[in-house]
Each structure stands twice: as structure tokens, then as C-alpha cells.
Image (spheres, helix red, strand yellow):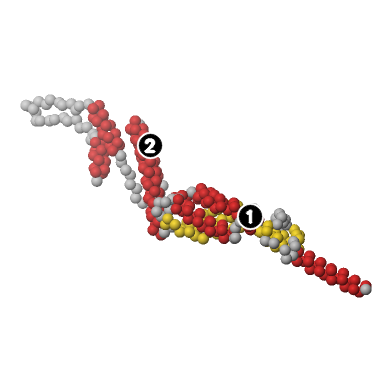
Amino acid sequence: MVEELIGAVAAAGTAGLVYLASAARVVKQYERGVVFRLGRLHGEVRRPGFNLIVPAVDRMRKVNLQIVTMPVPAQEGITRDNVTVRVDAVVYFKVVDPAAAVVNVEDYRFAVSQMAQTSLRSIIGKSELDDLLSNREKLNQGLELMIDSPAVEWGVTIDRVEIKDVSLPDTMKRSMARQAEADRERRARLINADAEYQASKKLSQAAQQMADTPSALQLRLLQTVMAVAAEKNSTLVLPIPVELLRFLERGHQEGAQQAPAPTERSVDTTEHPVAVDTTEHPVDTTQQAIDELRHAVEK
């Protein structure tokens, strides 16, 4: 009798262990459990930890709540300004309602992928090439709204959408390169022209200042000679400005006006042979120097 009782207790314990093993479910921290009893959604979503279900009656399906990174295959389309481009993107989404993700859609991952591809093609057709290249932030927001609208019914929320790359034809790349080069050349010419304009104004002011004070030109000439002589060249070319010649010529004219006229003596030639007493003046070296300097400049 005792042996039969012990055997019955052992059998019951074994059956209980088998039942517990078949009914026990462990839900991880990043998961939620959706229980179906006889094909119908039963109770609330099971929380992480140890959970029990009725074997052969209940069926639990676990749903991952982590953020899913899904690449969108490259889509080829024509922009609004008739340029053929190839664009690929990446979608970040997660499940916020496990029951809706299981009940309302057969495969929410596949559904989000197809919706992302369709929305990406629609964005390409509505945008221009410049927007795809430089205004991606606005396009990302529009693409996120287009995908998120139907995904709400699937218990999925779109975290963010990013356009990864925009592939252009080779002819378009060359055209854009030529355009950028021409624009940079235009800006360089404008900068050079502005620099020349500013330099001409400064040179005009300097020329006016030197015209008021002729000695400034001589000082500038000496500075130029010193700068050239510092290079240790075997040949030194010394420019002689025209103003220097004018200055020497002006000094010669003033000296000629101040010099006294030569005196003539009357000689009686009737009785005595002709004798003329001429007063000899020294040769004016200033005029000779000017002539030689001008002759050197002309050569």
C-alpha cells in the first residue's frame, strides 16, 4: 500500500514537472509576450520574466521591442527637374504595441520595408536634384512622415529615416564639376578686380602726394636702389624718372636767368690791329649733364 502511494506521488510529481516545463515561458527584458488562447488574443501582454500558460491551449508569441535598423534598397527615379538618380536610405523603427504588431499585420518588418521603398520613390519624384544633395534634412523628415502614417496602425513607430547616398550619372557629375569650376573662377576674377581697384586708388593717392612733394620721389628711388642692392646681383638697373630730368632742367633755366650777360668792348681798329678782349666764361656743366642723362635714357 505504501509503495503504491509512493509511486502515485512520484507519478503526480513527474506529471506536475512535465506540466510546469511545458507551461513555463521566460520573456526577456527587451521582449513582450502576446498570448493566444484557442486562437483568440487573451489578456494583457506578458511582461519580462517568468510566465505560465496553459499547455495545448495557449500559444505565446514573443515580440522584440528593440530598435530595428533596416536598409532600404537603392531606388532609381527621375527628379522633378528631369535628372535620373539612384537613392538609398536606412530606416530606424521599433514596436510600441506588440499586440497590434502581431494581429494587424502579417509581417511588420516586410511591411515597413515595402512602405519605405515606395515612399523613397515618391520623394525622388517630388524633389529637385539640389534638394537631394543639399537639403536632405527636410527630405528625411518628409520621408519619415510618409512611412510613419500607415505604420501607426501596425503598432510600429518610425524613429528616424536617413538618406544614405545619391548616385548621379557620370555626365551629370562632369557638368556639376564644370559649373563649380566656373563659379570659382568667376569669384577669383571678382576678387582680383576688386584688389586692382583698391590698389589703383592707393597708387593714385601716392602719386598725388609725390607730386606735391618732389623729394618723396627721390627717397622712394633710393629705397628701391637699396632693395635691389640687397639681392647681391651682379647687374644693377637704376631707373631714372622723368621728374628728375625736369627738376634738373628747371634748375638750369633758373640759373641761366640769374647769370649776367657778357660785356662787349669797343675797339678802335683804325690805327691798331684788331684786338678783341673777350671774357671767357666757364662751360656750363649742368646743360651737358642733362644732355648726357637724356641721351642715356633714350638709349
Residue drawn 36% across the image and 36% down it = 201
Q: What residue is at 76 percent from the left and 64 percent from the top?
A: 23
Q: Secondary structure at mark 1?
A: helix
Which label lies toward us, 1 or 2? 1
Q: Position of residue 149 (x, y in %)?
A: 56, 50
Residue 2's spot in the image, x, y percent?
Answer: 93, 72
| Picture residue at 70% right of the left edge, 57% below the top | 42
- Within the image, what quadrant is residue 260 found in? top left
Residue placed under numbered mark 2 in the picture: 202
Label pair 1/2, CB-CB below 8 angstroms: no
Residue 127: image location, x then y, percent = 45, 50
Sooner in the amino-acid sequence: mark 1 or mark 2: 1
Mark 2 lies on a secondary structure that is: helix
Query: Does residue 19 appear left or right of residue 139 in this picture?
Result: right
Q: Nearer the viewer, residue 51 or 28?
A: 51
Q: Which residue is mark 1?
A: 100
From mark 1 to mark 2, how far is it between C-alphas? 78 Å
Q: Residues within 10 Å of mark 1 (few under 14, many from 20)?
A: some
In screen coordinates, is 216 left or right of 299? right
Nearer to me, 188 or 48: 48
Residue 246 visible from this viewpoint: yes
Q: Label 1 sits on what residue type?
A: Ala
Q: In the rendered view, does 243 fall on the left or right side of 70?
A: left
Q: Position of residue 1 (x, y in %)?
A: 93, 73
- Under mark 2, the amino acid is Lys
Question: How packed is label 2: few (under 14 Cα within 10 Å), some, or many (20 or more)?
Answer: few
